[in-house]
Amino acid sequence: MIKVGLAGNPNVGKSVIFNNLTGSRQHIGNWPGKTVEKKEGYARCNGDTIYIIDLPGSYSLTAYSPEEIITREYIINDKPDVVVAVVDASNLERNLYLVLQLMELGINLVVDLNKIDLAELSGQSIDVKMLEKLLGVPIVPTIAPKKIGLNELCEKILEVAKFKKISPKIKYSREVQDTLEKIVSILERYRDEFRDYYLVWLAIKFLEKDPIVEEIIRNRIGKNAFNEISIIRRKFEEKHGNTELYMINERYRVIQDIVSKVVRGERKLTVSDILDYAFLDKYLGIPVFLSILWILFQFTFIVSTPFIDLVGDAFAFVSENLEGITGNAYLDYLFFGDYGILNGIGMILSFVPLIMTLYFALSLFEDFGYMARAAFLMDKAMRKIGMTGRTIIPMILGFGCNVAGIYGTRIIPEEEDRIVAIITNPLMMCSARLAAFSILVQAFWQANAGSVLLSLYILGILLAVAISLLLKKTVFKERVSPFIMELPPYQFPSIKNAFSEAWNRGSLFFKKAGTIILVGLLVIGVLSTVTIDMRPARDIEESVIAMIGEAFSPIFKPLGWDWRLVVAIIFGFVAKEIVIGATAMLYGVPEEEFATFIANNYDPLTIYGYMIFVLVYVPCIASLAAIKHETGSWKWVIFTVIYEVLLAYVLNLLVVSFGRILFGWYI
Amino acid sequence: MSKKEVYYLTLSILYIFYGLVQTLNGLVSIVSIEPIQICIKLGSICIPNIFPDFFAGVSLLTIGLLFITTLYYHRVDKKKSEGYLLVGWILAVLLFILNILEIAANILDAYYPIIFGKEPNFIWSLSTDPWGFAPQLLLGILSLPIYSSIKSYLTELFPGK
């Protein structure tokens, strides 16, 4: 089977090409040990099956970002038969930089000159034959959304994979060529040690002081040989200064020479330039951004609501009708009870419409080209508080659902910024917590209920900012991620792509989070229906969960809680929606009478502290599953759980203690 | 002033006015004050129904400001003016579509229990649905004629055209 790697800058239409070539025959996962998404699929072309891997979008092949390292390591280690470099024809100069770096790897390369229509619309034409001649690699012009040129691309891939060995031509300056040749001649002596590598590429990367390549060379050649090549590099450095910068300029010199020969016509104002007058307006840019976010937010949560309710009710309906079918009260409760397994599956499935709607909407805005502008607009302000501009989108989505917010962090390319955004997202007050709090605030603060709720929203945001700043100053302090911003041309979004993205995300969520939630529900279900000696409990007070509540209650005594509130917190670990229902059940009062009951038995300060605890402590099990999935590590899940529980406890204690000192007379 | 300029000015004023009222309604709802309604009453229906929602109001206000900027640049820089008009129109249409989707979602949310042989969650009607006659819907309809002025740019947004 022919193995093909799809490489290119972000926003060049790589995903559209991948989707159009592979159709439904694709799989999404993560690169081993990384949080970078891995997309692979199969295409049929003239009777042959082609395995295609969609490599992460990157601007170069240096060793700075995970995307760049993944791309080059895949090409070197997995040795695809052909690498297709997808190039945005309307931005040829910048895109050729990656093409040149791919050519340096000495691989079989095919250049897909995509968005050729946009180049023409901007008043430019590209001499494809001349470009092919100058680069020495086959070039196929395409318009991916209209599937124009994709058959030709497929045929060219087959042709190159089967019959052709590409010999790319890069004309670096005589001096660079000479230096590279000298290094290569020394590396040649150790040919067997470098079987997997193209020596010219090793020489270039060594010259650029690439730390990974330097280590590879150091470990495989003798000390003397390493000194020899280091001397060659030092001499070059003495003459030209920073070698990496010199090679960047050298590549751009080659590119400018090529572009001057193949691109005809002056670039005129496009619809993208015209739209950017308003989208990037100094004063109106931010209100436009807020309006778009609000539309996205509304679309996601309002449009998905009936489907969420429908799925939840459908499972509740089935549970109700199946109750009694086993003839055993214990099994009945375990499978069909309010917190039973079937309702648990319903709860997991009810998240799916939300995830799908969110990704459908996000994909539309991403495809349109707006997300890059949003990040650009917000970046300056967000950097000041230790976050990147792109963080604002998952933060806002987190107000609806933290799971959606955590998955929404995928739009943040820098791994460390993304991890910070992921682990602080659960501090955003999600709709589940809003539902639980609205009952409590109505019970205690009636007229000022809105203000109390708003104070919790603000507290969540302030805590997220504080934690981000702390992480940036401690855990990630040495890591400064360079910010490269590309503003892709606007285009009408692909509805098909949006549906495909929604479907993929929905099914991915169900598979990954579903298993963890089910296990969690099963554990809590069993614990709340059995006694310590594993006999069916007559009521919940006899159950293991009640014992756990009692065991933990001394810790929560200073906060003014009894064991029932502790147990409700444990239930809330499954989903925050459960907190109120569980508390009502534990007190043995109907949910509709719960507000009055709690107002008669607790003071406002204890309940305000309790709400702060619920806002801050462990995110629900679905959020934890999403954190595990998105960070690819239990380390961050454990970190999130620990810091949030500690923070929740300390904040609650502070509020209650100071509150009693300040408002003791009132309470 | 040309007819076009009068049209842009009228739209700007309406969007800014209803945007301000809705933003204000959103703010005062926090302290449980009754929202301000400036509308034509048809029985129990208020047209338009300016339900309290801070960000919905901000969105209307933003569109109004985009249209007023269109007018500001109209005689100075044609391309710039068209940029603001295009973005204003896109937002207006997005709000209009969102409004229709909201109504559809609310209808679905009210009546889906019928599938399980149960009573509807609530009885839906245009008068009880806050989005039934919302300014987003009515002003969206008023903005539709702008399409003829920006058609060529929209065509350009479709790849391959």
Image: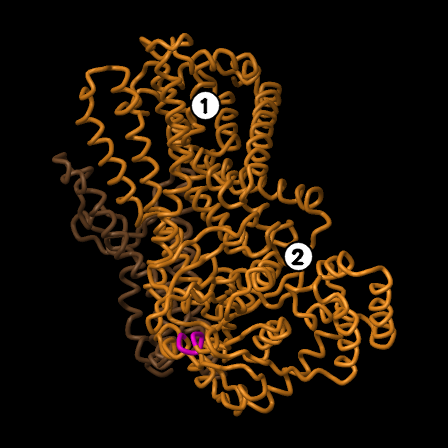
Chain colours: A orange, B brown
- Secondary structure under the numbered disc 1 in the rendered image: helix
Is the residue A225 above or below the residue A270 in the image?
Answer: above
Residue at image position (51%, 77%) is A111
Q: Nearer the viewer, residue A446 or A126?
A: A126
Q: Is residue A461 left or right of residue A311?
A: right
Badge 1 amino acid: Ile
Q: Earlier in the sequence, mark 1 or mark 2?
A: 2
Circle 2 sits on which residue? Answer: A481
Q: Is residue A64 left or right of residue A150?
A: right
Q: Within 10 Å of the Cα at label 1, are there few (<14), some (14-19), or many (20+) other Cα atoms?
A: many
Q: Which mark is residue A160?
A: none
Q: Position of residue A497 (x, y in %)?
A: 36, 63
Q: Nearer the viewer, residue A288 or A663?
A: A288
- Secondary structure under the numbered disc 2 in the rendered image: loop
Question: Given the current orientation, which residue lies at the most extreme left position?
Answer: B117
Q: Are marks 1 and 2 on the same chain?
A: yes
Q: Nearer the viewer, residue A139 or A295?
A: A139
Find residue A214 and report its image quarter: bottom right
Q: Is residue B21 left or right of residue A232?
A: left
The Cα–Cα distance between marks 1 and 2, rounded to whole angstroms, is 38 Å
Residue B5 seen in this snapshot? no
Q: Position of residue A333 (x, y in %)?
A: 28, 20
Q: Nearer the viewer, residue B130 or A311?
A: A311
Q: Position of residue A82 (x, y in %)?
A: 50, 71
Is the residue A338 above or below the residue B87 in the image?
Answer: above
Residue at image position (75%, 57%) is A215
Q: Main secondary structure of the magenta part?
A: helix
Is A113 covered by the magenta stretch? no
**Which range of residues does the magenta coloring cover?**
A154-158
Q: Which mark is residue A570?
A: 1
Q: Chain for mark 1?
A: A
Q: Chain for mark 2?
A: A
